[in-house]
């Protein structure tokens, strides 16, 4: 038998949180039973595209979703689903814009239409009215509701669906074995950082407003003033990176901050860190914080992040209203010992090796009648 092909709808398959989560699951799936294909919304090649093709997936490119091209985009969606009748399950990860894709899927008679929430806020920008409209339209088109956390589910789908247990929380699981503490890997990473015995604070995130890098540098400056041997490792890229590099220079931190760009060896690099710092303005349930916990790191994070993220008791939540000095005091009072958390993460449903089996069964069971499928989801809860 041919595998069931699931259409995953994303923006672009770069090394972001939800994309990494999808790839974690994709690699672990029995691809004789389930195969992922991807609808992306960028013309340029994504970081994971080559691996997707190697694993047997297909990639379909759509235009970027903008208010000025809605009419063209809606027509292209209708044409896509009219042509690709093989998709019985569409799993959309583009937050409020999932309503557009799932509307076309519903018109085409796709029986299983999953909207998956990965954020707990939109932020404010010029497109906010259009994004709020898309979120309002969400209620009519999906018939399955996924979220990375309860908070993210309530934000996108509303309190009524949250209270009625219609939302399935699919954990942002990681391959726990990849992150297990290894002294040799730690020494390799520390050597690359040229860290010696210095205190190494790590951060991983795209350089965008949401990640709050400017405040992160203020916090590190306060740490560095109190402990001059401290070092900050920043991994990722994005439009705000040049401005953050300039600010590091203005603060006199140039020799104490390493900008490593996008990296594929995150498990190894985390071994070389002593603490993970993550002061985001808003998140859903960040994959990178699950990875940091899998590496046994203590994490100091903003209290805007849902407490559901603290699977291991290794997170310290701090208000963004607190001063950089207050953040620095918490960081400097922390324990820097790596702790083996693999068993706890596995038992809590954050190991992809086990969760991929559940997701495989879920996709297969969605060919059952509606009532049977509800029983399946309820058993998972």
Image: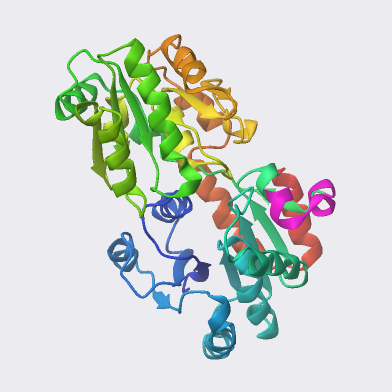
Tell me what residue is drawn at x 60 percent, y 70 percent.
89
Horizontal side of 261 relative to 170 (left or right) equals left
Residue 156 among those drawn in magenta: yes
Q: Is residue 37 above or below residue 354?
A: below
In depth, the one of 93 and 28 nearer the eye is 93
Residue 13 appearing in the image: yes
Q: Residue furthest front?
A: 250
Horizontal side of 190 relative to 274 (left or right) equals left
Tell me what residue is drawn at x 42 percent, y 34 percent.
176
Residue 367 appearing in the image: no
In depth, the one of 187 and 282 nearer the eye is 282
Q: Is residue 65 above or below residue 212?
A: below
Tell me what residue is drawn at x 20 percent, y 23 percent.
190
Residue 188 among those drawn in magenta: no
Q: Horizontal and vertical percent for residue 149? A: 64, 43
In depth, the one of 371 and 78 nearer the eye is 78
Q: Quadrant of residue 82?
A: bottom right
Q: Horizontal and vertical percent for residue 356? A: 51, 49
Instruction: Give the magenta-colored segment's residue range.
Output: 153-164
What colour-coding does the image apply? rainbow
């Amino acid at each position: 038998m041919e595998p069931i092909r699931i259409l995953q709808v994303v923006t672009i398959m770069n090394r972001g949180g939800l994309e990494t989560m999808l790839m974690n699951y994709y690699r672990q799936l029995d691809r004789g039973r389930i195969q992922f294909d991807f609808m992306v919304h960028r013309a340029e090649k994504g970081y994971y595209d080559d691996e997707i093709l190697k694993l047997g997936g297909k990639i379909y490119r759509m235009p970027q979703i903008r208010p000025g091209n809605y009419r063209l985009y809606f027509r292209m969606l209708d044409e896509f689903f009219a042509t690709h009748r093989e998709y019985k399950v569409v799993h959309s990860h583009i937050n409020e814009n999932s309503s557009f894709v799932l509307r076309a899927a519903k018109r085409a008679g796709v029986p299983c239409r999953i909207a998956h929430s990965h954020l707990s806020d939109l932020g404010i920008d010029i497109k906010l009215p259009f994004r709020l409209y898309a979120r309002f339209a969400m209620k009519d088109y999906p018939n399955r509701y996924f979220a990375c956390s309860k908070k993210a589910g309530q934000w996108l789908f509303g309190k009524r669906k949250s209270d009625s247990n219609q939302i399935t929380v699919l954990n942002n699981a990681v391959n726990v074995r990849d992150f297990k503490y290894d002294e040799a890997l730690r020494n390799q990473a520390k050597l690359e950082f040229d860290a010696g015995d210095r205190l190494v604070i790590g951060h991983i995130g795209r350089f965008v407003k949401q990640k709050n890098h400017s405040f992160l540098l203020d916090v590190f400056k306060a740490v560095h003033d109190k402990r001059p041997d401290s070092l900050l490792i920043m991994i990722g890229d994005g439009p705000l990176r040049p401005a953050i590099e300039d600010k590091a220079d203005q603060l006199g931190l140039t020799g104490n901050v390493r900008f490593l760009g996008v990296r594929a060896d995150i498990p190894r690099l985390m071994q070389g860190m002593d603490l993970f710092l993550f002061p985001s303005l808003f998140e859903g349930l960040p994959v990178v914080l699950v990875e940091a916990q899998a590496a046994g790191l203590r994490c100091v994070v903003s209290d805007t992040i849902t407490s559901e993220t603290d699977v291991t008791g290794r997170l310290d939540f701090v208000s963004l209203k607190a001063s950089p000095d207050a953040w620095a005091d918490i960081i400097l009072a922390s324990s820097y010992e790596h702790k083996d958390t693999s068993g706890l993460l596995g038992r809590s449903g954050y190991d992809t090796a086990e969760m991929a089996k559940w997701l495989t069964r879920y996709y297969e069971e969605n060919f059952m009648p509606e009532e049977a499928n509800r029983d399946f989801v309820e058993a998972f809860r």
